[in-house]
Amino acid sequence: MHQVALNVGYQSRSSFTRTFRRYYRSDPLEYRSEAQRAPPSSSATPAEDTIEESDAA
């Protein structure tokens, strides 16, 4: 997870985790675990929704 935090521009894993929890209301590891258990869906994540809306504008 530290590498993920660095790749997306965070200086520390704790900062990344805190922001992730605030946005997704879940710990990154819990989110990943749920995503692996859930069947694939066509719904977009909140970040993808924002990108799609801005492309349409």
Image (tube, rainbow, N blue to C red):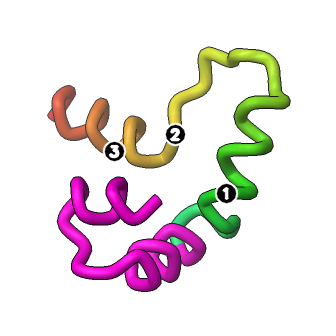
List the residue tagged with mark 1.
29
Q: CA distance from mark 1 to mark 2?
A: 16 Å
Under tag 1, what secondary structure? helix
Q: Position of residue 3 (x, y in %)?
A: 33, 57
In the image: residue 13, left or right of residue 24: left
| First to last magenta residue range | 1-22
Quadrant of residue 21 within the rendered picture: bottom right
Under tag 2, what secondary structure? loop
List the residue tagged with mark 3.
50
Q: Is residue 5 magenta?
A: yes
Quadrant of residue 53 within the rendered picture: top left
Give amino acid for label 2: Thr
In the image: residue 50, left or right of residue 45: left
Q: Position of residue 44 (x, y in %)?
A: 52, 30
Give amino acid for label 3: Thr
N-terminal of the two: label 2 or label 3? 2
**Tag 2: Cα neighbours inside 10 Å, few (<14), some, or many (≥20)?**
few
Residue beneath the point at 24% across and 63% down: 6
List the residue tagged with mark 2.
45
* The one of 4 and 25 positioned closer to us in this rendering: 4
Q: CA distance from mark 1 to mark 3?
A: 23 Å
Residue beneath the point at 52% across and 39% down: 45
Under tag 3, what secondary structure? helix
